[in-house]
Image: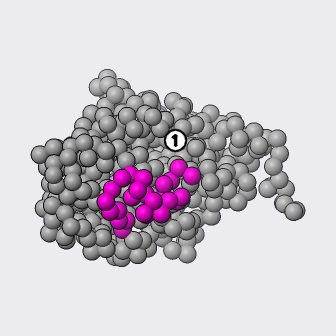
Amino acid sequence: MHRPDTERPNARNILTSTLDPLPREECGVFAVTGIPNAAELAFLGLYSLQHRGQESAGICAVNGEGVARVRKGIGLVADVFTAEDLNELEGTTAVGHVRYSTTGGSRPQNAQPIVVRYAQGDLAISHNGNLTNAQELRNRLVEEGALFQTTSDSEVIVHLIARSRHDTVEAQIDDALTHLEGAFSLAISVGETVYAAVDSRGFRPLVLGRRGSGYVVTSETCALDIIDAEYVRDVEPGEVLKLEGSEVTKLRSLPPAPQPAPCVFELVYFARPDSRIWGASVDRSRRAFGRQLAREHPAEADCVFAVPDSANSAALGYAEESGIPYELGLLRNHYVGRTFIQPSQADRDFGARMKYNPVREVVEGRRVVVVDDSLVRGTTSTSLVKFLRQAGAREVHFRIASPPVRFPCFYGIDMPSREELVGSSHSVEEIAELIGVETMGYLSLEGMLESVKDFGPFCDACFSGNYTAPLVDVQRGLASLENPPGC
Ligand code: AMP
């Protein structure tokens, strides 16, 4: 088959694509401008975005001369920054980031924000989402002589801005963004000016807030609440905003996509329930999923409880709709990280034991409905059912407040390869048998989408396989659909 030159593999792109796969990342972004002690606010904002990434954290602050200083490292927000660091990060502008990536991308140099000195001044960038043509762009930039210091797809954006032939910062950013495919919610500072941009489908949330005479952009509204900032509006799909002191200017919009595709998995699992994104309350959305789940999969049971904390709202919805009493049947130890992010299978099982414990007085001799927000590999649920049986549960009815996850995400949610997704290889009956429950029920795709129809349409690729933004690297043979980069 004839392939155009740009698609023909050569030694260089084979090297970069096989030895150095680009990691997929889950992230939270935060930026503030026009407010004193910006780094302290960024610290607080990132603290409340910690659920979006627990591997690394970083803050870059820009002082009155436009000089950027950055502190970033591996670890949780509270561990990465000391009070002294925050004192040294002077200025009224700051850009921050929290990040988690799959194996392969777990390197200190991938921590964000990425900070560089370029022709127009000091530039810092925080990115949430994954680009689907990052490998292709990177190969091209490497061919042209660009030197990459990280394996993160976000660095491609920095090179595109720096190499743009346009002569203003606005035009250079705009030029860079038009080359990108896939998901990006960005906060970029150049000197003391902050730019906020969202891809034309709006995969990942980004909200604009105001505090005094300054502005904030961040992934979720919970990061506005913690610093007492007022929500102004969402940054719309395809929008590029310039925030300078107390001024917000809308720059040219990116070419529109056929339709927006915000990620429904943000509402299912990823975002915090006290946030509002895309006009939707995350808590209310999850309750609506739970209520619909109760209609679709009722159960004869004595009590209903959640796999805490991500399924709390959905379990409340299930209880409200079914009339089955809501209980606190499972306790979660809050001092253990997410089990899902442990590197090996053995560690994951152990992680579930460390994290959850049933309340014997609630479950003993009873028929229980357990609600979880999603099922990925099926490891958490398998362990939980074992614990519940040991605590004397008579019947276990498992309910999932989303459809089976059957496809990996290429737009910024960490999902394992297809073969590890239990929903892609097993029927619901087989999963029920595998995890050892009396009955099992997933929320239907239609039921999920109907529950949040006022805020959609959504990207539901992890459930449906309907990838709205082209998977350019996959199409070019630079990434695999079955085992996406980073796995
Ligand atoms: P699993 O045990 O692999 O089936 O994982 C299911 C659990 O992981 C559920 O309780 C979810 O709340 C949680 N979960 C789902 N997606 C993710 C994700 N992308 N990262 C971390 N945890 C997740």
Residue 141 left/right relative to 5? left
The residue carrying pointer 1 sits among few (fewer than 14), some (14 to 19) or many (20 or more) residues within 10 Å by Cα, namely many
The residue that appears at 48% across and 70% down in the rendered structure is: 260
- Circle 1: residue type: Thr
Q: Is residue 104 above or below residue 422?
A: above
Q: Position of residue 285 (x, y in %)?
A: 29, 66
Q: Quadrant where the N terminus lies?
A: bottom right
Q: Is residue 430 magenta?
A: yes
Residue 446 left/right relative to 300? right
Query: Image quarter for residue 331?
Result: top left
Asked whether 421 or 232 is in front, the reply is 421
Q: Position of residue 255 (x, y in %)?
A: 58, 69
Query: Image quarter for residue 72?
Result: top left
Q: List the single residue furthest toward the right.
A: 2
**Mark 1 vs ligand 1: CB under 8 Å?**
no
> Can residue 397 be seen from the camera position used here?
yes
The residue that appears at 56% across and 54% down in the rendered structure is: 418
> Can residue 206 be seen from the camera position used here?
no
Asked whether 290 or 133 is in front, the reply is 290
The residue range painted magenta reads: 419-443
Q: Position of residue 417 (x, y in %)?
A: 56, 50
| Colour scheme of the rendered structure | one colour
The residue that appears at 50% across and 53% down in the rendered structure is: 421
Q: Mark 1 falls on what kind of element?
A: loop
Q: Quadrant where the C terminus lies?
A: top right
Identify the residue under disc 1: 102
Residue 106 left/right relative to 273? right
Q: Is residue 18 above or below residue 413?
A: above
Q: Is residue 37 magenta?
A: no
The residue that appears at 39% across and 58% down in the rendered structure is: 432
Asked whether 51 or 182 is in front, the reply is 51
Q: Position of residue 29 (x, y in %)?
A: 41, 47
